[in-house]
Structure formats: structure tokens, C-alpha cells
Image (cartoon, rainbow, N blue to C red):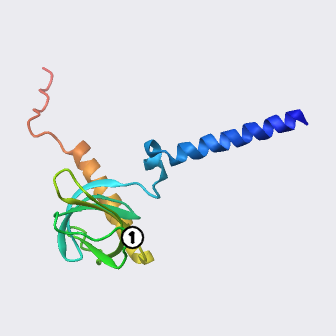
């Protein structure tokens, strides 16, 4: 019996330590539902110009001017992303609304009620743009490079 009790105590201790680690802010990025891509895109949030700073399959982070203010937790908003013309305005809920050091508002958005077609379009746009960026960064030849001289 004492060995079983020791195992139970050790198991509960491990569970508590694990829960604290998962909930710790240091490991917050590991709780995301999908990968976030850093972006520099223009957009409109409910008709107000914004900068889309990161984007994923489940949400986005945008920055809007300081005069814009809506409470976190509200739904029924629309995000339009300028360069992603294959996407209709995306339905979003505001999950975060805080002041940035610049005085602008940082707004965390969650996509709500996206159709399967819109999710597929978003995934294609995200991953294609990342592949295009990586390919151009690696494969674009340097125009200043001189061809090798043939051996004499």
C-alpha cells in the first residue's frame, strides 16, 4: 500500500507541475491552435484602416489608430486583407484590445464561422506567400556575381 500511495502522490505532483507549465505565460506560444506568420499587410477592420501584423488560420493581430476602440469579447466584425483578394471579408471576434507603445491599438482577432472554402483559400494564401518569399530569398541570383573565367 505505501508504494501505491507514493505513486499516487508523485502522479498528482507531476500533473500539477505540468498544468502550471502549460498555463505559464512563457509557454503561451505553444498553446496556439496554428502557426502565425509575421506580415506587413494593409487591411480594413469594420471599414477602419489597419495593419495586419500577423496572420494564421485561426486569427490575426492588427494595429489600428488610437481613436478606434471596441471591447474585447465582441463578435460580428469583418477583416478585409488588401493583398489577399481571393478572400472575402473575414468574420472575426475581438479577443484582445490594448494600447501599443505608439498610442495605437493592438487588436487580437479570432476568425469565427469561416466556411471550409474560405479556410482553404486562407491556408493557400498563407502558405503560398511564405513559399514565394522563401524561394525568392534563396533562389534569386545575385546580379553582381561575375561568371567564372574558363580555365586556360
How far from the left and from the top, in percent, is residue 103? 17, 56
What quarter of the picture does the C terminus occupy? top left
How far from the left and from the top, in percent, is residue 65? 16, 64
Front-most of residues 25 and 83: 25
Q: Provide the residue designation for mark 1.
A: 73
29 relative position to 105: left or right:
right
* Secondary structure under the numbered disc 1 in the rendered image: loop
Q: Residue at x 31, y 77 (%)?
A: 77
Which quadrant of the view contains residue 107? Answer: bottom left
Q: Residue at x 40, y 71 (%)?
A: 119
How far from the left and from the top, in percent, is residue 146? 10, 32
Q: Residue at x 25, y 69 (%)?
A: 84
Q: Look at the picture and state if 141 lies above or below 114.
A: above
Number of labels in the image equals 1
Q: Look at the picture and state if 50 lies above or below 117.
A: above
Which quadrant of the view contains residue 124? Answer: bottom left
89 relative position to 26: left or right:
left
Which quadrant of the view contains residue 142? Answer: top left
Amino acid at each position: 500500500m505505501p508504494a501505491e500511495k507514493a505513486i499516487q502522490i508523485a502522479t498528482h505532483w507531476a500533473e500539477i507541475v505540468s498544468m502550471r507549465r502549460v498555463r505559464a505565460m512563457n509557454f503561451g506560444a505553444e498553446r496556439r491552435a496554428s502557426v502565425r506568420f509575421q506580415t506587413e499587410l494593409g487591411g480594413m477592420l469594420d471599414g477602419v484602416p489597419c495593419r495586419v501584423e500577423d496572420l494564421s488560420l485561426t486569427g490575426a493581430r492588427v494595429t489600428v489608430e488610437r481613436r478606434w476602440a471596441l471591447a474585447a469579447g465582441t463578435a460580428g466584425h469583418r477583416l478585409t486583407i488588401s493583398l489577399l483578394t481571393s478572400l472575402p471579408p473575414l468574420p472575426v471576434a475581438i479577443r484582445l484590445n490594448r494600447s501599443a507603445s505608439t498610442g495605437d491599438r493592438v487588436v487580437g482577432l479570432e476568425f469565427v464561422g469561416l466556411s471550409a472554402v474560405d479556410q482553404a483559400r486562407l491556408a493557400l494564401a498563407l502558405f503560398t506567400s511564405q513559399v514565394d518569399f522563401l524561394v525568392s530569398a534563396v533562389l534569386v541570383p545575385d546580379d553582381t556575381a561575375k561568371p567564372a573565367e574558363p580555365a586556360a
